[in-house]
Amino acid sequence: MAGGRSPITCHVLDSSCGKPGNNVPVKLEMLNPAANNAWASVAYGLTDSDGRVGTLLDPSHQLVAGIYRMTFQTAEYWAAKGVTGFFYPYVQIIFEVAPGAEKQHYHIPLLLSPYSYTTYRGS
C-alpha cells in the first residue's frame, strides 16, 4: 500500500460536540460464504485522540474481494462521556471490496450523535 498506511482506515466525529470520537473500539470482519455466511474477524482497533484508526491492518496486508463489516462500539464511547439514553449502542457499516479493487484504499468515516449517525466512503 502506497504511503505505508492500512488499506482500511476509519474516523469517528462526534457531531453533537464537533470533536473527534476518541477511544471508540472498532472491529473489522469479513463475510465468509464458505462458512454459511458467518463473519470472520479480521482486525480490532481503538480510535485515537483524533478519532482515527490508521493502523487497523498492516500496510502490507492484501485485501481480498468480498463483503466487510466494521462495527463501532458506540455504547462504550457514550458511557465514557456520561451520556445516557443514547439510541445506537453500536453502529455496523457493511461495505464491499469489489473484484479488481483490492488495491484501493478504503476509508470509513462515521459522523455520530446520541440519536443519529451517517457515513460515506471517504478518501
Image: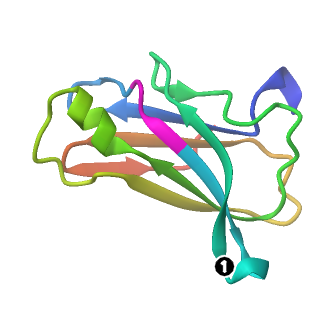
Q: Where does the image place residue 43, in percent across and percent down from the top left?
A: 67, 44
Q: Is the residue 49 above or below the residue 9 in the image?
A: above
Q: Nearer the viewer, residue 33 or 109?
A: 33
Residue at image coords 89%, 61%:
100
Residue at image mark 1: 37
Left or right, 42 with respect to 99, comes to left
Residue 9 percent location from the top left of the image: 63, 36
Queried whether the magenta region covers residue 56, the answer comes back as: no
Of the pair 106 and 78, the residue shown nearer to us = 78
12 versus 118 height, above or below: above
Q: Does the magenta segment cover residue 23?
A: yes
Quadrant of the image occupied by residue 36: bottom right
Q: Position of residue 123 (x, y in %)?
A: 64, 37
Quarter holding the N terminus is top right
The residue nearer to you, when weighing 93 against 26, is: 26
Circle 1 packing at 10 Å, graded few (<14), some (14-19), many (20+), is few
SS for callout 1: loop
Q: Is residue 15 visible in the rendered structure shown here? A: no
**In the current view of this chain or complex, which residue is farthest to the bottom?**
36
Query: Which kind of residue does numbered mark 1 sit on?
Result: Asn
Tell me what residue is drawn at x 42 percent, y 33 percent: 24
> Where does the image place residue 109, in percent across and percent down from the top left?
50, 40
Q: Identify the residue shown where x is 32% and y is 49%.
A: 117
Magenta range is 22-26
